[in-house]
Image (tube, rainbow, N blue to C red):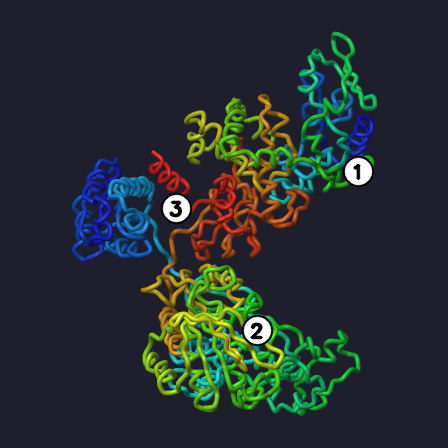
């Protein structure tokens, strides 16, 4: 895959279709692949990486990049294309300045899961059927691929690219996933159990803002949490409970716009399952307003910004709140 | 430094009985910025208002908090008082310690504590209030009346009388509504058609009134004084301007087996029809579901076409399309009326099994000279004269189950007495039984009317409910009932059963309420702005209520309310301009993301987007898409402020920071 992507990037740069490429390069560790901008074939040859650890969704970078001179080439996995579509819908990106090449996702690996097996000093990995061969500074280790797969890929919702200018390889289909299983489990808890679950999870938060900064739905010019006039900013710092509310408020802010790309949980250094908050909203929207997938297209009306007579009444909050 | 005055009202004992007003005034006097805190028996009285005015002058107040009733009640009073004392009226805040506090609490300690908290919230808000100035917007001098029954007709006539243009939009092929279907009217027993049809003709002939029959309101935009409505004129396949109403087409039409909706399906009509002889407009309409030609799908096909052949005026147009008219209105009057409820859930009365079990409205048609039997009362099943008739009251009314309606339909007691009396008068050999829970006859000459039915006409009134109605093989109907006064079970062998069916608002009312952003109650009756003091206005400015769409009503009441609604509409239409609400939204362009969330939720179309050049911190310029609010169109509903993800959208007088300050004050 990497070769095909690199040669496509070089070709589009050479024929002048684009003047920049957003892709990925190696970070500090082998599993630490970071988005990067490439402006020449030489830069690409030197640093471009697309491997099993390349999870990062580059859609959000296009908010700024698409406003610059010239066209930028973006390689998007199926899940990433939903994010871009949503950004187009919200007029956050300049579509004319983006050239999208759809690439397959194939399921990305989570280095944390490998490390949890006691495997450290990872220098590279190779999939061999269902077995994952891991090169480490201490020698080769193996483990089942499925056990190293990142959570967001395990509950993949679609292998279909919803927007692209061209594709490398075949397009896939929207697939049935079990992504709401855990949400259901939480719903079946008593409110006290649920409260305890979330207090426990959210109290781990160190407010590094990684979730917000990576989120393709969080693209406000000025985030309410950075705006002293918003009255939200100082509240979130008042005490630990208020601080926990940061994630709840953020989930409300992206409700109806979150495409469930899973980046928030992927980047959380404290492994808080933040995506569950968003999935709860998605599940509720589906059941209360009809099936809706944010980013599936650029024209449909967002259920929370649209009123129809079939909408549920406000009393649903009360009805559902009864235990 | 703020100088805030706090004024706590006793409202006689309304507040003072459950709230220690002295303690509230005391507690609030210590709040930051408060320089004077007073209480008074009636703050809205002239003496009370003078307290506020004097304090504004004496203490040079920068803000006023009145702890009293709902702002819907007296906010305007105190704003005016403040303005007359030289303070911007929008620096006045009301803490509602009556409806939201004293009236709903019993314990003085709790109520007092809550009143103090509500006062604190208002003080926290008033700290952030800014002076606002109201603008003006013009009033379109035309009214829209939705519904052409007696309510709509009366309203339209009154508005036209005052010299304003009125459009009536009626969904049926003729105006007249339910009253046109009624035979005689209580308590005077004069014929409904005799008093209604002259009014229908008057509406037709009045040059200020335009009747859009067979039409619907498909969209309404705008706000008080400036509504724009789209009226869909449904295709009737007949050119209204050419049709003379001669009726030759209806005779020529070979499709004669169409249930006659005007006679509630009790007889048949042709596919092309004029609902009744005095229809207004007297224009034919083709029912496309039954017309042999139109049902075929291809109008160019040489099928039938008998009506077109018969029409000497050349009015038949099989190619006619729906027509949409857009018109500006200053005021809208809703007069959508009522319908009897569906009786599918009432198997016990055998309505769907036996043709001789009829609703009261069907009985009106059966007794009407223009009805299916030419005015002779005959059983629908075998066209014989019924000798024993049982009336059942409260069918679906005053129900505590989900089958019926919880309310009293109000008109049934009287029309049942009327029916009973008319039958006994015309057919003295017929025995009439009425089963009732209560007989409710408040109203001028109403109880006298009912007593006449009992005393003079010997109608058998039996207190008790009918349990089961069973059609028997011999054609009679077994009515099983209980007599609650003699405590016995009865079986009556009846020839006919008449059900006083509950009435409900017309089904078009709810979508219309959504379109007009007006409120409805749980029964889908429109909610008035104030149950006692503003009974014909909706809570949405410029929308008025006429007739049974607001609640069950008889004809005199409907006409009274229709005229009242008209006078309110006229009061609006005579103005050249109205004061706008200065509490409108505005966007902070520096924070706006350009996402269009606000534009999508705005019900008034007040928000547009523009690409605007901005100077960036690094001395570059950038074009950004930002929201722009038209303050003349914005109605200050605040939907945009909650839809905005970045908090760029804010509302004058209810800013995000003001709301947050109130919440903080409450949670402290």
Q: Are marks 3 and 1 on the same chain?
A: no
- In this rendering, the label closer to the viewer, 2 or 1: 2
Question: Is disc 2 placed on a helix, strand or loop?
Answer: strand
Residue B451, by quadrant, is: bottom left
Question: Spatial distance from mark 2 to mark 3, Cα to Cα?
Answer: 63 Å
Dot 1 falls on a residue whose secondary structure is strand
* Viewer-proximal residue among B327 and A292: A292
Dot 2 and dot 1 residues touching (CB under 8 Å): no
| Whether residue B336 can be seen here | no
- Indicate the chain on which mark 2 is placed: B
Question: Of marks 2 and 3, which one's residue comes earlier in the chain?
Answer: 2
According to the picture, the residue beneath numbered tag 1 turns out to be A167
* B422 shown above or below A309: below
Within-10-Å neighbours for mark 1: few <14, some 14–19, many 20+: some
Which of the two residues, B307 or A164, is positioned nearer the viewer here? B307
Tell me, for residue B654, which label it has, or none.
3
* Viewer-closest of A73 and A77: A77
Q: How many marks?
A: 3
Query: Disc 2 and disc 1: Cα gap in Å?
Result: 72 Å
Q: Please determine whether, in this image, residue B359 is positioned above or below residue A88.
A: below
Image x and y of residue A252, in percent:
53, 38
Output the chain of dot 1: A
Residue B544 placement (x, y as % from top left) = 41, 67
Q: Are marks 3 and 1 in contact (CB under 8 Å)?
A: no
Question: Which quadrant, please, contains the N terminus of chain A?
Answer: top right
Residue under pointer 2: B470
Q: Residues within 10 Å of mark 2 (few under 14, many from 20)?
A: many
């Amino acid at each position: 895959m990497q070769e095909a992507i690199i040669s496509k990037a070089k070709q589009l740069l050479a024929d002048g279709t684009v003047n920049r490429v957003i892709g990925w390069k190696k970070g500090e560790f082998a599993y630490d692949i970071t988005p990067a901008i490439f402006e020449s074939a030489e830069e690409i040859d030197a640093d471009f990486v697309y491997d099993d650890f390349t999870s990062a969704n580059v859609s959000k970078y296009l908010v700024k990049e698409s406003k610059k001179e010239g066209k930028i080439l973006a390689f998007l996995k199926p899940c990433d294309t939903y994010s871009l579509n949503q950004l187009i819908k919200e007029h956050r990106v300049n579509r004319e300045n983006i050239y999208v090449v759809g690439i397959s996702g194939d399921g990305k690996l989570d280095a944390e899961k490998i490390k949890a097996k006691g495997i450290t000093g990872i220098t590279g990995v190779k999939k061999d059927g269902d077995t994952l061969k891991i090169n480490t500074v201490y020698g080769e280790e193996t483990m089942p691929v499925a056990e190293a797969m990142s959570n967001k890929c395990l509950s993949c919702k679609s292998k279909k690219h919803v927007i692209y200018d061209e594709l490398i390889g075949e397009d896939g289909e929207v697939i049935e996933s079990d992504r709401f299983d855990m949400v259901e489990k939480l719903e079946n808890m008593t409110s006290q159990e649920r409260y305890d679950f979330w207090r426990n999870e959210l109290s781990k938060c160190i407010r590094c803002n990684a979730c917000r900064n990576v989120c393709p739905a969080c693209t406000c010019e000025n985030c309410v949490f950075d705006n002293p006039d918003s009255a939200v900013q100082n509240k979130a710092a008042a005490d630990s409970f208020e601080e926990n509310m940061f994630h709840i408020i953020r989930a409300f802010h992206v409700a109806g716009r979150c495409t469930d790309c899973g980046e928030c949980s992927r980047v959380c250094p404290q492994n808080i399952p933040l995506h569950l908050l968003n999935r709860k909203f998605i599940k509720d929207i589906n059941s209360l307003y009809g099936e809706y997938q944010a980013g599936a297209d650029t024209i449909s009306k967002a259920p929370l910004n649209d009123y129809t007579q079939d909408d549920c009444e406000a009393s649903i909050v009360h009805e559902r709140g009864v235990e | 430094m703020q100088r805030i005055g706090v004024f706590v009202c006793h409202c006689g004992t309304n507040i003072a009985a459950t709230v220690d007003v002295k303690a509230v005034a005391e507690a609030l006097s210590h709040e930051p910025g408060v320089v004077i805190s007073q209480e008074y028996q009636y703050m809205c009285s002239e003496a009370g208002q003078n307290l506020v005015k004097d304090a504004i002058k004496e203490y040079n107040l920068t803000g006023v908090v009145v702890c009293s009733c709902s702002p819907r009640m007296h906010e305007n009073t105190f704003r005016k008082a403040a303005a007359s004392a030289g303070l911007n009226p929008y620096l006045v805040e009301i803490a509602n310690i009556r409806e939201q506090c004293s009236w709903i609490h019993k314990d003085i300690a709790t109520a007092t504590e809550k009143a103090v908290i509500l006062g604190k919230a208002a003080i926290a808000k008033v700290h952030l209030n800014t002076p606002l100035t109201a603008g003006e917007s013009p009033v379109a001098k035309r009214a829209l009346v939705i519904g052409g029954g007696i309510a709509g007709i009366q309203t339209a006539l009154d508005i036209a009388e005052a010299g304003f243009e009125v459009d009536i939009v009626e969904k049926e092929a003729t105006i007249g509504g339910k009253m046109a279907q009624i035979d005689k009217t209580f308590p005077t027993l004069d014929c409904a058609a005799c008093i209604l049809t002259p009014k229908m003709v008057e509406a037709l002939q009045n040059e200020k009134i335009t009747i859009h029959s067979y039409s619907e309101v498909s969209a309404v935009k705008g706000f008080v004084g400036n509504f724009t409505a789209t009226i869909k004129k449904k295709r009737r396949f007949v050119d209204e301007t050419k049709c003379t109403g001669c009726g030759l087409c209806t005779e020529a039409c070979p499709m004669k087996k169409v249930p006659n909706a005007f006679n509630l399906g009790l007889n048949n009509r042709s596919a092309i029809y004029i609902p009744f002889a005095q229809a207004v407009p007297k224009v034919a309409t083709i029912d496309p579901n039954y017309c042999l030609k139109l049902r075929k799908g291809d109008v160019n096909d040489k099928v039938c076409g008998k009506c077109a052949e018969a029409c000497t005026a050349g009015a038949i147009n099989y190619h006619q399309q729906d027509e949409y008219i857009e018109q500006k209105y200053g005021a809208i009057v809703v007069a959508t009326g009522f319908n009897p409820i569906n009786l599918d859930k009432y198997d016990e009365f055998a309505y769907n099994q036996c043709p001789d079990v009829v609703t009261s409205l069907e009985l009106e048609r059966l007794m009407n000279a223009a009805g299916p039997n030419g005015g002779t009362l005959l059983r629908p099943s075998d066209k014989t004269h019924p000798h024993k008739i049982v009336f059942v009251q409260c069918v679906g009314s005053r129900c505590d189950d989900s089958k019926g309606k919880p309310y009293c339909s109000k008109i049934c007691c009287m029309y049942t007495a009327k029916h009973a009396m008319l039958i006994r008068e015309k057919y003295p050999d017929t025995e009439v039984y009425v089963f009732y829970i209560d007989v409710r006859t408040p109203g001028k000459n109403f109880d006298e009317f009912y007593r006449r039915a009992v005393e003079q006409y010997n109608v058998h009134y039996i207190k008790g409910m009918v349990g089961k109605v069973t059609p028997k093989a011999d054609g009679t109907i077994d009515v099983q009932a209980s007599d609650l006064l003699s405590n016995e079970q009865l079986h009556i062998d009846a020839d006919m059963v008449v059900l006083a069916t509950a009435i409900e608002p017309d089904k078009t009312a709810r979508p219309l309420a959504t379109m007009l952003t007006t409120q409805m109650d749980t029964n889908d009756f429109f909610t008035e702005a104030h149950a006692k003091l503003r009974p014909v206005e909706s809570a949405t400015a410029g929308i008025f209520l006429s007739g049974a769409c607001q609640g069950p009503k008889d004809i005199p009441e409907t006409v009274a309310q229709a005229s009242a609604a008209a006078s309110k509409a006229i009061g609006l239409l005579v103005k050249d301009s109205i004061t706008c609400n200065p509490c409108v939204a505005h966007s902070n362009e520096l924070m706006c993301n350009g996402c269009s969330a606000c534009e999508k939720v705005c019900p008034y179309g007040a928000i547009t987007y523009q690409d605007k050049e901005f100077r960036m911190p690094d001395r570059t310029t950038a074009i950004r898409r930002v929201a722009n609010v038209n303050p003349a169109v914005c109605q200050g509903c605040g939907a945009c402020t909650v839809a905005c993800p970045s908090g760029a959208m804010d509302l004058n007088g209810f800013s995000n920071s003001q709301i947050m300050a109130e919440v903080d004050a409450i949670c402290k």
